[in-house]
Amino acid sequence: MTAEPMMVEATEIKEPDFVPEEVAGWVEKLERGEDIHLQQPVTDQGQVVVSSVQPSGVKIVLPLTADGVQKGLHAKILDSVRWLAEWCVRIIKKFPGKVFYRK
């Protein structure tokens, strides 16, 4: 007595492109990756549960020089220096103005 596999159709649920009129005044759509800043910390019975993060003077130093990144981007895809250079470019794009090359 073996059970027959059952076929189930998969459906994708998408976020609607519009906001219903009833909630339009209450809802503010945020794009992905957008920073959320709290006006004041969230408290529960006098204890701070969530507070807004304020980074102070973050300075990121990459493990490669500018020349090393350029050489790494032209290396073979199987070389580890290629992936390190790709990672450096990703960090530069993610944190503009806060990233510096190694001297």
Image (cartoon, rainbow, N blue to C red):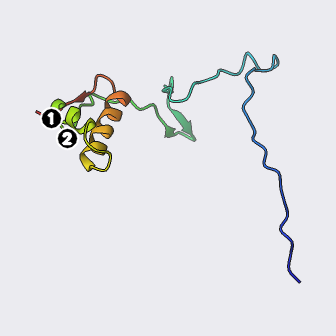
**Residue positioned 85% across, 64% down in the render:** 6
Nearer-the-camera pick, 99 or 49: 99
Question: Which of pointers 2 and 1 lies earlier in the amino acid sequence?
Answer: 2
Relative to 94, is 23 on the left or the right?
A: right
Percent x, y of residue 23: 77, 21
- Quadrant of the frame with the C terminus: top left
**Residue positioned 17% across, 36% down in the render:** 68
Label 2 Cα crowd, 10 Å radius (few <14 / some 14-19 / many 20+): some
Q: Secondary structure at mark 2?
A: loop
Percent x, y of residue 16: 75, 27
Q: Secondary structure at mark 1?
A: loop
- Quarter of image, res 70: top left
Question: Of the residues shown, which amino acid type is indicated by label 1?
Answer: Arg
Residue marked by disc 1: 102
Nearer-the-camera pick, 26 or 3: 3
For the residues labelled 2 and 1, the Cα–Cα distance comes to: 6 Å
Percent x, y of residue 39: 51, 23
Q: Which of the numbered marks, if any, corresponds to residue 68? A: none
- Quarter of image, res 69: top left
Relative to 23, is 58 on the left or the right?
A: left
**Residue positioned 32% across, 38% down in the render:** 86
Question: Of the residues shown, which amino acid type is indicated by label 2?
Answer: Pro
In the rendered picture of this protein, how many numbered marks are placed on residues? 2
**Residue positioned 34% across, 30% down in the render:** 55
Circles 2 and 1 in contact, beta carbons < 8 Å: yes
- Quarter of image, res 3: bottom right
Residue marked by disc 2: 63
Label 1 Cα crowd, 10 Å radius (few <14 / some 14-19 / many 20+): few
Nearer-the-camera pick, 13 or 45: 13
Percent x, y of residue 34: 50, 26
